[in-house]
Amino acid sequence: SSGNVTNPSDQNAVVGKTVTLSASFMQSVFLSDPFGISGTWYVNIGGTWMTASDAASKNLITNLSTTSDKWIGNYGTKTTITFTSNTAQSVTVQALYSGTLTPWLTAGASKVAEVNFYANDIKATNVAIAGNDYAYTGNTYQFADTTNPSNATGTITWASSNPDVGTIDNNGAFNAVKAGTTLLTVTLTNGDGTKVSASKIVTVGNGLTDQTASVGDHVTFTPENLADLTN
């Protein structure tokens, strides 16, 4: 089935600071556009939805840049939006996906995310990571940062200690590459240069753990995070 793989995350920033959001979508193998799909970003400012390019042409947002790249052949797409605001305001963003052959038909849409621009920096005192402890090889997972206060405006960066096992981008999208463990670290840099960080160990595998048994013994395998295979 088709659907979102990763979604844009809420962000907070000081006026004039550039923010980047990303999303990814996979179309159904059986109901797919053979030439691929692409994402178009929309924003809601002051209660009105419009394309991000229209918002930029009206100077409601500035320094706009978007990308939409094919992913896993023509079945998926990864898309990003980068922009800033010269005024204190809230901007709601969402990616809409359409086919190359049928651009007038919407294949799906990301979840909405809220970007709040503040007149002054808001300093974080700590940060935490929300996300799975276990990841299945070959899958993509979304990790999120939670800050105190929740509207801290610092810059977030992510890192994986073992990129051979899994990689993560600065929007928290984690790609499970091969079996093993890696330490994910999120760091928030405040406007004054001070930093807070948090880490989380993530295990990547096929869901099963090797077992040793004698001839004739019964062995039971219980997959890790079974809900990930059924949701």
Image (cartoon, rainbow, N blue to C red):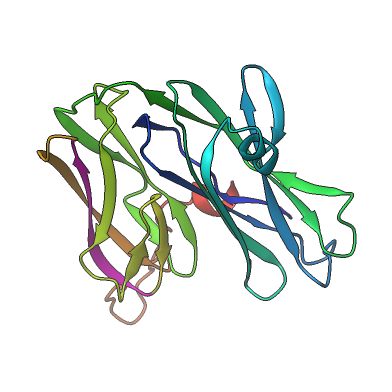
Examine the rendered structure and indicate whether residue 130 appears above or below residue 212. above
Which of 50/175 is in front? 50
Examine the rendered structure and indicate whether residue 112 appears above or below residue 41. above
Q: Residue at 32% x, 23% y: name it.
A: 151
Q: Position of residue 4 (x, y in %)?
A: 62, 49
Dominant secondary structure of the residues highlighted in magenta in the image: strand
Mark count: 0
Which of 7/50 is in front? 50
Does residue 180 belong to the magenta stretch? yes
* Res 207 seen here: no
Q: Which residues are magenta?
A: 178-190
* Res 136 seen here: yes
Q: Position of residue 148 (x, y in %)?
A: 22, 24
The part of the image, by quadrant, that contains residue 210 is bottom left
Q: Position of residue 110 (x, y in %)?
A: 63, 42
Residue reaching furthest to the left: 194
Examine the rendered structure and indicate whether residue 215 appears above or below residue 2. below
